[in-house]
Image (spheres, rainbow, N blue to C red):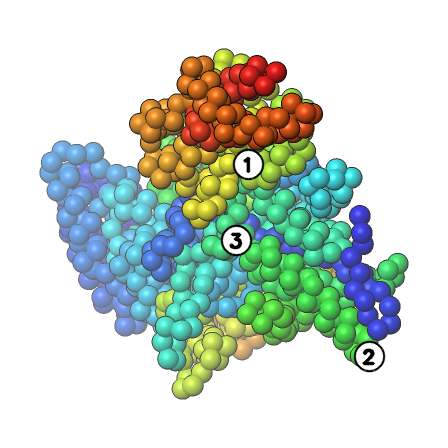
Amino acid sequence: MTQLTDLGIAAIRDGVAKGDFTATEVATAFNAAVAAAQPALNAFIVTTPEKALEAAAKVDADRAAGKALGTMAGVPIGMKDLFATHGTQTTAASKILEGFKPQYESTVSQKLWDAGAGMLGKLNLDQFAMGSSNETSAFGNVISPWRRPNDTAPLAPGGSSGGSSSAVAARIAPAATGTDTGGSIRQPAAFTGISGIKPTYGRCSRWGVVAFASSLDQAGPMARDVTDCAIMLEAMAGFDPKDSTSLNLSVPEWTAGLNADMKGKKVGIPREYRLDGMDADVAKSWDDGIAWLKDAGAEIVEISLPHTKYALPTYYIIAPAEASSNLARYDGVRYGLRDLPDGAGLQDMYAATRAAGFGPEVKRRIMIGTYVLSAGFYDAYYTQAQKVRTLIARDFTEAFQQVDVILVPTAPSSAFALGEKSADPLEMYLNDVFSVPASLAGLPAMSVPAGLDRNGLPLGLQVIGKAFDEQGVLNASLALEQRAQFSARPAKWW
Amino acid sequence: MSEYRIQGATGEWEVVIGLEVHAQITTNAKLFSGAATAFGAEPNTQVSLVDAAMPGMLPVPNRECIRQAVRTGMAINAQINKWSRFDRKNYFYADLPQGYQISQLYHPIVGEGAIDIQLDDKNPDSVKTIGIERIHVEQDAGKLMHDQHPTMSYVDLNRSGVALMEIVSRPDMRSPAEAGAYLSKLRTILRFVGSCDGNMDQGSMRADVNVSVRKPGDEFGTRTETKNVNSVRFVMAVVEQEAKRQVALIEDGGTVVQETRLYDPDRNETRSMRSKEDAHDYRYFPDPDLLPLELDDAFLEECRASLPELPDAKRTRYEIALGLSAYNAGVLTADVETARWFEALLAETAAKAKKPEAEVAKQAANWLISELFGALNKLGKGLDNSPVSPAAGAELLALIADGTISGSIAKQVLEKMLETGDGAAAIVEREGLKQTSDTGAIEAAIDGILAANADKVEQYKGGKEALFGFFVGQTMKAMQGKANPGVVNELLKKKLS
């Protein structure tokens, strides 16, 4: 028999429902896997084995009592530590929130618990979700379970949802929540050979999710495959009157609607994404993806998204601008860290608290954001960026008059080693070049594993869809998944 | 209308005034959270997770606050913007949990409007129109308490997130009296609309007073802004003091600095605050947690339909349809509670008399203004806590109208009513104050008086007719005020002829 920790969401849920194993057995197995991997991978900031067991016990009792089970019943998951969890420390991987235990539960996590999921722990991430390698966490780097052949150099699991990607790839969690502001679900999924979808902006409530950039932040699932992502996204999504930007739409039955037949569908290939000096393996995997979708029956159409080259600078104005304001609440007055030097006044307390509480990348983005919003620079930066954002969104709108989905690489390279890019923020920001445009346009986008590069490391392909058309994205991703036949997994070294 | 001028050493100066009035919207819940807004609650008992800016909390606009702002805009005939947007005003302070105030800088919900002020109640030509630039909706901040601990400040977030309207006037006022009249009129309108209770002493309405001075005909001078002035009287005092200060400063060779000032009522002077406007860059930008506010026609129609009769319209109706004097109409419409009280009294009085309201309106208005106001005033009370209800007042007026008691007895009855809370008829009955029309008793009294004043009777008959009033008075006195004056007149005329 396969190990329980090899199973994904659907297999666990169905096995528990059928009585092949109990939810408690599943939770116990994953708790043990988490405990064994934690010293090496540092995927979690806190582990909550008791929460996983408690949820499992309830599922087992409900099953015994003949009650209907939820769509995630018996599935223990990792919760990115950006989601507020009642009574369990929620930090956004920042010192400034160390020890903070919310007296409320985020809408998305509550929906997952209501669907029968349990919590293995709070997953590490880049501090305030700002980063692409999980090197900005105040609670240590997350290590990818992947390694280059004959090389023990620790690799980045991607970011900001690096704890999520590492845990799912290492089989210490069958699935995890992620959040995506400029690629924070898709890029780590690509780096670790797993699947992850950022739905249309507004699908998942932001209530109770520590804010990075409000107009971009969107939660989504990270899991082994497309079907598991569909199941979990259904559980996470839905209108929330507590979030003014929440979409007031019913949640489609994405899982039931999964269909890998691409006959009659048109797939756009934007020429602007084929960058000079593109990594040869990335280019090849993109070509593979095109061939697979053609094989699935799709018509391939070359399209143009002319403002693509402005997406990255636009993103790095808008996201820091919003962040500089969103993070003003961490001031030491009401909760979290307070650094009050002797004889300090209010301004000194702010300065000391924020200096001690925020990491360097967070400070950098607060400063960038403060700068671009300041008098005299606002129009040149923020207003201009908003205009360009509109043009980028219009590019997509026009493209989607010709095609159903767009296929591009998820990231410009496979996983890099820790420390390799952390000295140069600009090089790090370039990691988001393929993921940021869909974020700015609020569109659903998914990364699925496409294969391994010359270093034996996973590469991801990204499907971008029309607003509200998660189904189209999931279906194209399923077609890729079936043809990629991606079965590689990291050798267990921890 | 005489112009207000400050006499300086170099000649006359004109003062230019604009007011930014912060009016707390009357709602049970805050602008973006469900927390309560009652005045005087224990510190930090009306604070939601949103108001405390806990991580991940999001604002959701309170429809009632938006509705009240729209209704207020309609009441000042302003342009209502069907598309408006909330912006963040960023600054750090311990009473501002989010680190920003959600406000509306670029696209306010209400655009240009105007209100008319009348400087002299008895002179309809003293009306002046004051322009209103905009009304926007924003969050209030919390409160810091610096006197509770030797080294620490305490924070009370009860007010944090409470909905305010900021009503920004044009710099159209030219005297303390105009500023006072504008603020009073604005408060009257807000109370009529029901969008703000106007209680300045509780902080639900306060004004930032912008003042500058210039030689008449010159360009505007540099203005100062005196913050959070909380009474009409103080606003007038600020204008006066600040204008004088600026004139003296300029004439001494100084220049007025654009700055924020505070008013100290104890010393009746304004003082410079830390110059906030220069120090802060508020980094306004659209709040990404909120969608633009879009108002549909049905909502606007509902807002318009729910507006009550407004003070100016009511005043005109009182004058034209009810025949009240301009002064009485002004007094009765200066406050929504007074108007409400008057209209209740009027309805009851007309019903009892079985007459149209217009026929009893003068009697009711006169009694309310000259009798009840005075009597309440003596007791240190107002209409809001009057022991006499409109129905009770109408009962008293009915007794006068049907001749049961005279006007002078009515004064005594009113005093007893205020004292005991009893009804007029019961008091008249109990105290035996019913007016008599018994000709026998009145005749007897008249005979006695004429006999005792034979000399005056002679003078009267000799042509000194003014003495008639003396005989009436004496008769009434002898009858202890209870004689029907009509009968007394009639009998006296007969006996003296």
Q: Is residue B419 left or right of residue B471?
A: left
Badge 1 amino acid: Ile
* Residue A31: x %, y % from top left: 21, 60
Residue located 48% across and 21% down the image: B447
| Residues at marks 3 and 2, CA–CA distance in whole angstroms | 37 Å
Dot 3 alpha-carbon crowd within 10 angstroms: few under 14, some 14 to 19, many 20 or more: some
- Residue B291 in which image quadrant: top right
Badge 2 amino acid: Gly
- Point out the tag, 3 or 2, that comes first from the N-terminus: 3
Q: Secondary structure at mark 1?
A: helix
Q: Is residue B390 above or below residue B239?
A: above
Q: Secondary structure at mark 2?
A: loop
Labels 3 and 1 share a subunit: yes
Q: Which residue is mark 3?
A: B200
* Residue A368: x %, y % from top left: 60, 69
Q: Nearer the viewer, residue A199 or B127?
A: B127
Q: Are marks 2 and 1 in contact (CB under 8 Å)?
A: no
Q: Is residue A371 left or right of residue B341?
A: right
Q: Which residue is mark 1?
A: B369
Badge 3 amino acid: Met
* Residue B174: x %, y % from top left: 76, 55
Tag on residue B361? none
What is the chain letter for disc 3? B
Q: Secondary structure at mark 3?
A: helix
Q: Which residue is mark 2?
A: B253
Q: Nearer the viewer, residue B332 or B132?
A: B332
Q: Is residue A129 above or below residue B134?
A: below
- Point out the tag, 2 or 1, that comes first from the N-terminus: 2
